[in-house]
Amino acid sequence: MVPALPQAVVSIVPQWVGAGKRISTIAVLRGLTVAFVGFTQMGVSARVLWSDADREWAS
């Protein structure tokens, strides 16, 4: 007996693929943008932390 969840997923996926081709590009671009911004902010905060550590180390 096939569980209900995989069956539902299998029935939904083709609809997602049909409707999702346009949406997925937008979603991927948005995801990349969010990830890029997140990594940039992480990099900035890491740099700030490192410069603070350098300042304390120097003094």
Image (tube, rainbow, N blue to C red):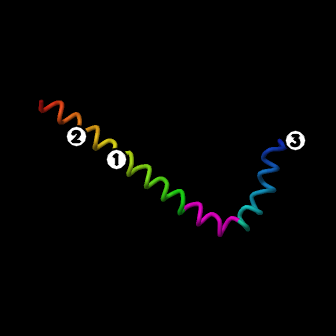
Disc 1 marks which residue? Answer: 43
Q: Is residue 31 above or below residue 2?
A: below
Foreground disc of the pair 1, 2: 2
Residue at 81%, 50% (x, y): give it: 8
Amino acid type at mark 1: Gly
Is 4 positioned to the left or the right of 36 in the image?
right
Residue 53 part of the magenta-drawn span: no
Bounds of the magenta segment: 20-28
Q: Is residue 7 above or below residue 51?
A: below
Amino acid type at mark 2: Ser
Q: x, y percentage for residue 4?
A: 84, 44
> For the residue labelled by badge 3, is the local secondary structure a helix, a strand or a loop?
loop
Disc 2 marks which residue? Answer: 51
Q: Quadrant of the N terminus?
A: top right
Foreground disc of the pair 1, 3: 1
Q: CA distance from mark 3 to mark 2?
A: 60 Å
Q: Earlier in the sequence, mark 3 or mark 2?
A: 3
Q: Earlier in the sequence, mark 1 or mark 3?
A: 3
Amino acid type at mark 3: Met
Q: Is residue 53 above or below residue 38?
A: above
Q: Nearer the viewer, residue 20 or 54?
A: 54
The answer to whether the residues at label 3 and label 2 have Cβ atoms under 8 Å apart is no
Q: x, y percentage for residue 21?
A: 66, 68
